[in-house]
Amino acid sequence: MINGTCKSRVRKRADQIKSYRCKNLIAVLEYPTDIKNIGTVIRNVNALGIEKTYIVDPKKSLPDDWSEMRNRKSLSKTSTSAIKWSFVKRFDSTEDCISHLEKNRFISVVTSPHIKGKDNVVLHEGDYTYPRLAVWFGNESRGISDLAVANSEFCISIPMYGMIESLNLGTTSGIVLYEVTKQRRAFQVAYKRAIRGPRITGQLKI
Ligand SMILES: C[S@@+](CC[C@H](N)C(=O)[O-])C[C@H]1O[C@@H](n2cnc3c(N)ncnc32)[C@H](O)[C@@H]1O
């Protein structure tokens, strides 16, 4: 394929999806250990039009530099190249990530299969239309930290009806972020209509 044709296709697609993107929405992974899960979350984040992924990575298993991260073969493979089109930032600690989010006026909500903190909601009953929202996902075996819970507005759970205690991290991110982005897109459409008249309609045609 001629390079110019490829570029114009990418540009066209970028223009098509622009108004559907969920700005001021961040998915936060706290101490993820499995590269396949990290790749799956980045893929979900990209597919759902979420602005950013933050990763709390005290073991420094990921590079600090974004372009270096984008060129990591393992991440490119597990995210099916979504890393190329996604903004990912790493933090050394939960404290650093919380203070960065607070400085930028983000509200945090955490996810857990268990009751955590003061306020708990089942996924479909929560309101995710805060102007700036960070949705936290916990470590594969330990779950979300007490510090993240203490600094969050509420804890979201996906009801579990089987014999097992929890869902896989990558799967959870897809389910939770689908609901969050669905609500935020509906809110964005209603808000834009209210101030400018109808512009975005129904399903994105590809
Ligand atoms: C494999 S789970 C961790 C299980 C861990 N034993 C615990 O107590 O949370 C990894 C992450 O996926 C998310 N998760 C898994 N199942 C969930 C559910 N039913 N509802 C909400 N979040 C869930 C949470 O963010 C959790 O920290």
Image: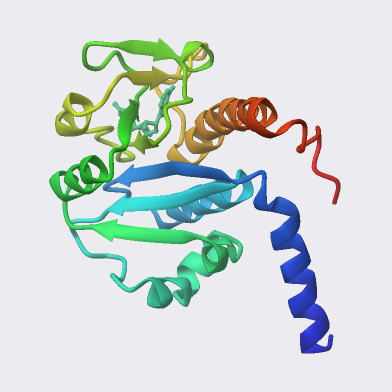
Rendered residue at 37%/37% (across/down): 134
Q: Is residue 33 visible?
A: no
In the image, taking residue 194 as reference, residue 23 lies left or right, namely left
* Quadrant in the picture for residue 25: top left
Rendered residue at 67%/31% (across/down): 189
For residue 102, above or below residue 18? above
Rendered residue at 24%/35% (across/down): 142
For residue 186, above or below residue 42? above
Which of the colour schemes (rainbow, by chain, secondary structure, one colour) is used? rainbow
* Quadrant in the picture for residue 13: bottom right
Q: Position of residue 85 (x, y in %)?
A: 56, 64
Q: Nearer the viewer, residue 185 or 170?
A: 185
Q: Position of residue 198 (x, y in %)?
A: 77, 31
In the image, taking residue 73 as reference, residue 205 lies left or right, namely right
Rendered residue at 72%/59% (across/down): 15
Q: Position of residue 181 (x, y in %)?
A: 57, 33
In the image, taking residue 200 as reference, residue 125 lies left or right, namely left
Q: Position of residue 136 (x, y in %)?
A: 34, 36
Q: Nearer the viewer, residue 23 or 191?
A: 191
Ligand 1 placement by image quarter: top left
In the image, taking residue 3 as reference, residue 82 lies left or right, namely left
Residue located farthest toward the front when viewing the structure as drawn:
196
